[in-house]
Image (spheres, coloured by chain):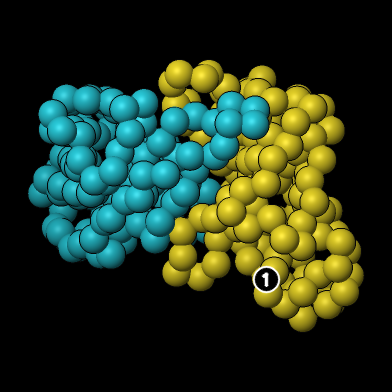
Amino acid sequence: LAKTTQPISMDSYEGQEVNITCSHNNIATNDYITWYQQFPSQGPRFIIQGYKTKVTNEVASLFIPADRKSSTLSLPRVSLSDTAVYYCLVGVLLYSGGGADGLTFGKGTHLIIQP
Amino acid sequence: NAGVTQTPKFQVLKTGQSMTLQCAQDMNHNSMYWYRQDPGMGLRLIYYSASEGTTDKGEVPNGYNVSRLNKREFSLRLESAAPSQTSVYFCASSEAESTVFRPQHFGDGTRLSIL
């Protein structure tokens, strides 16, 4: 089971680009990297997922170096509403009887955006 | 489109009482999950169901039972509630595909207090 390490908290300002890095030194060949966002009193919400190189969608980019031992979530031009906890997960989808790798949420990174 | 619906949203129990938390999804997902989240912590997997008719233990299954009633519904039961089970409980669902990690969709949680 690939363990992840993220900063506990980060601060930034509105309009800035924010990069949150996750370390996963023992990532396995089949593992995917998935990021979730969680606001207070809500369930986590999927942001982005990737396997290698770069993935971009309408809300974020995910950068994964060739060795895949880390990944960086990039949030462009953040606003106050991006204040949330961000979780990095690494693993493969479970299949019946195959285990639950990739379903371990650490404490995440508490991102605080200031005006 | 409701996504994942959890009931009730709030509940207070006395030690030793039993209760069932309900979860239903309308996305035709094969896999469903139950997590608990304690203050300042990430989510911990209690039980999961990879597909209809199967259930497996997660990281913290003790004190809980689950039932995958049909493809849409996955319930979590506390047979004899204990104060240590005071937490926020999240249900999630995802598509099942053995080679690709499909993101999970979460409900908004059930806040359970046990006195």
x and y percentages locating residue B30 in the rendered image: 65, 23
Residue at the image point whose x is 23% and y is 60% from the top: A7
* Subunit that carries the residue with mark 1: B
x and y percentages locating residue B97 in the rendered image: 53, 18
How many dots with numbers? 1
Residue at the image point whose x is 65% and y is 28% from the top: A96
Q: Name the amino acid type tagged 1.
A: Thr
Seen in the picture, residue B14 relative to A42 is either above or below; the reply is below
Seen in the picture, residue B75 relative to A31 is either above or below; the reply is below
Seen in the picture, residue A4 relative to B19 is either above or below; the reply is above
Residue at the image point whose x is 76% and y is 62% from the top: B63
Seen in the picture, residue A81 relative to B96 is either above or below; the reply is below
Q: Give the chain letter for cyan.
A: A
Q: Give the chain letter for yellow.
A: B
x and y percentages locating residue A91 in the rendered image: 41, 36
Instruction: Determine the secondary structure under disc 1.
Output: loop
User: What residue would you read off at disc 1?
Assistant: B86
Q: Is residue B101 visible?
A: yes
